[in-house]
């Protein structure tokens, strides 16, 4: 109880501090919300590296301050933003993009092809999470035409046009990430690190005028954000599933579908190998396909959603459930203990010594499952899966570690990871043999020549439709694939709902399926937000 009181007091103190920049009329009791044109939001964490798209800001959601060349509508269809259209050459190597001529940065300077050229050239050299290695060159052909030349055909290059916010060549200095200038619907006002971010509507924005003139983002932990919502100090708060059953007067719960998934990555290779850095690779238990398939079949994903997520999520079967490139044929029947047991028996896994753990020769059906020790949801998922599989004769030792420790252990131990993106390239990064051991990608050293071939063809496709067909085959082609129906190098468990407490009469529009990361992606359609009439 004392801890809860402390959290509430902390939230109120931080909120009072944050309100120092608000008008007196906002703080008056009884203000008519329909006349209030400012919002206070506690929806997510503070970006560690600031607000520079050339180093990754906006990759998993709206860049807010900046505009992108293209965007996705609420149905995830690609539509124009700064671009008025684009063409791709027959060989897929040259992408020509036409720009609108009425876009301006918030400092009044026009946005032209020179800014687009500068943005992509800078991003390609940043050494950040932005991968533009396929880009040979980018050039402003004229004031409102930019041309990208690729080293090889790459259908997923379109996602770089969707997620890279354009920065001003004339004002992209060393402190840009701390004081961004862009052409998006809102402009930067003030960032008090560790406390709040204040933005205002950009009067020079070329799109629809936002209803709200000012937004204050409070950087609160989820429990403190919940306390602030209960105290009536915020208009919207991101919360964890554990708080979703509690009623808060004057607010409603908004649960958004997502591909923000959680799943178990299995070491696919047998033990005995090492990386160039000397890290152990492989695990003889999880290298056995029967173990991986049995786990996938035995896990009760619906029970995980109901028990761990308080019903706020969906069962997960792939890295891209429900997205345009998802193959529904990859979905398996789960929670079948008899079927899972038969898979193991047929593969020679038996309990010969009666200790409740299966053996195959001298090998016990035991392995360690790592999770980040600061993530309670992943901890509960890991423990629940271990409990589910114990009657099957598979002994999972659940262990919490720091991310630094996990990075050194993930090639030889199962890990409870989280991913989820609007870019099919994520599938390539997680499963293609070319990405084996590359950072966090393909940590289990999975490889399948047929799967690689499908994904290579998807990348080389010159139309989105052609690429999607190959992405689907990579998951399951009727005989093989990267899904649980095929090699089962992962056991995907759940897709989280992104949960927000929202003022009862605040309309947040029709939201897309959310990507990985609770918080910033919800602002993608912020120009549509308004008070209900």
Image (tube, rainbow, N blue to C red):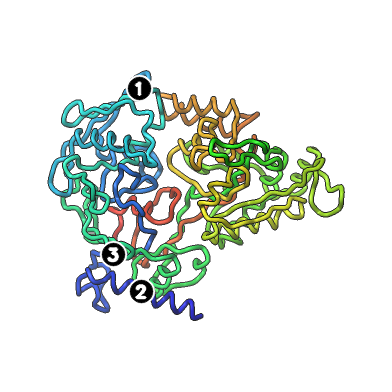
Task: Please indicate, yes or no, whether residue 428 appears anywhere in the rendered image.
Answer: yes
Q: Residue furthest top?
A: 91
Which residue was labeled with disc 1?
93
Q: Would residue 326 be visible to someone looking at this image? A: no
Q: How far, Cα to Cα, is label 3 from label 2?
A: 12 Å
Q: Residue 33 falls in which quadrant of the image? A: bottom left
The tag earlier along the polypeptide, 3 or 2, is 3
Q: Are marks 2 and 1 in contact (CB under 8 Å)?
A: no
- Where residue 68 appears, as percent x and y from the top left, is 29, 41
- Residue drawn at point x = 53 percent, y = 66 percent: 242
Mark 3 and mark 2 in contact? Answer it, CB < 8 Å: no
Q: Taking 14 as reference, is 332 above or below it?
A: above
Residue mark closest to the camera, 2 vs 1: 1
Q: Position of residue 510 (x, y in %)?
A: 38, 52
Residue at disc 2, secondary structure: loop
Secondary structure beneath label 1: loop
Quadrant of image for the C terminus? bottom left
| Residue at 47% across, 50% down | 258
**Residue at x 22% of width, y 53% of height:** 187
Count of picture labels: 3
Figure check: 43 above or below 278: below
Q: Mark 3 points at which residue?
A: 39
Q: Going 71% across and 42% down the picture, which residue do you hit? A: 285
Frontmost residue, 446 versus 282: 282
Which of the numbered marks, if any, corresponds to residue 232? 2
């Amino acid at each position: 109880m004392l801890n809860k009181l402390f959290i509430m007091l902390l939230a109120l103190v931080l909120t009072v501090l944050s309100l120092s920049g608000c008008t007196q009329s906002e703080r008056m009791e009884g203000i008519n919300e329909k006349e209030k044109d400012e919002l206070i939001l506690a929806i997510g964490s503070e970006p560690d590296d600031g607000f520079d798209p050339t180093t990754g800001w906006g990759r998993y959601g709206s860049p807010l301050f900046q505009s992108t060349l293209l965007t996705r509508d609420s149905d995830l269809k690609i539509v124009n933003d700064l671009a008025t259209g684009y063409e791709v050459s027959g060989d897929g190597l040259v992408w020509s993009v036409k720009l609108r001529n009425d876009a301006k940065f918030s400092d009044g300077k026009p946005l032209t092809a020179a800014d687009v050229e500068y943005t992509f050239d800078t991003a390609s050299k940043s050494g950040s999470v932005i991968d533009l290695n396929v880009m040979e060159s980018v050039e402003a052909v004229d004031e409102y035409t930019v041309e990208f030349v690729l080293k090889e055909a790459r259908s997923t290059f379109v996602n770089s046009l969707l997620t890279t916010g354009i920065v001003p060549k004339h004002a992209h200095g060393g402190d840009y990430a701390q004081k961004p200038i862009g052409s998006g619907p809102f402009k930067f006002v003030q960032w008090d690190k560790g406390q709040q971010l204040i933005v205002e509507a950009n009067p020079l924005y070329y799109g629809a005028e936002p209803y709200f003139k000012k937004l204050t983002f409070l950087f609160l932990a989820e429990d403190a954000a919940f306390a602030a919502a209960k105290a009536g100090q915020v208009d919207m708060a991101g919360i964890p599933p554990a708080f979703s059953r509690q009623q808060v007067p004057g607010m409603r719960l908004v649960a958004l579908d997502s591909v923000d998934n959680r799943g178990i990555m299995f070491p696919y290779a047998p033990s005995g190998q090492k990386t160039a850095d000397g890290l152990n690779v492989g695990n003889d238990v999880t290298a056995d396909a029967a173990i991986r398939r049995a786990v996938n079949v035995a896990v009760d994903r619906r029970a995980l959603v109901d028990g761990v997520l308080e019903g706020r999520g969906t069962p997960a079967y792939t890295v891209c459930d429900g997205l345009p490139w998802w193959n529904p044929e990859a979905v398996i029947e789960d929670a079948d203990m008899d079927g899972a047991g038969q898979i193991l028996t047929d593969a020679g896994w038996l309990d010969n010594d009666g200790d409740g753990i299966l053996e195959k020769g001298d090998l016990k059906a035991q392995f360690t499952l790592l999770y980040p020790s600061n993530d309670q949801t992943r901890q509960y998922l890991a423990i629940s899966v271990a409990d589910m599989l114990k009657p099957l004769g598979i002994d999972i030792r659940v262990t919490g570690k720091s991310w630094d420790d996990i990075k050194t252990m993930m090639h030889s131990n199962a890990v409870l990871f989280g991913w989820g993106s609007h870019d099919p390239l994520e599938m390539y990064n997680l499963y293609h043999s070319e990405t084996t051991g590359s950072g966090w990608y393909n940590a289990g050293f999975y490889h399948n020549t047929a799967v690689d071939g499908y994904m290579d063809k998807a990348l080389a496709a010159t139309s989105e439709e052609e690429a999607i067909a190959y992405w689907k085959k990579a998951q399951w082609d009727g005989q093989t694939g990267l899904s649980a129906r095929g090699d089962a190098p992962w056991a995907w468990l759940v897709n989280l709902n992104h949960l927000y407490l929202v003022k009862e009469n605040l309309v947040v529009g029709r939201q897309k399926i959310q990507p990985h990361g609770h918080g910033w992606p919800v602002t993608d359609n912020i120009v549509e937000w308004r008070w209900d009439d």
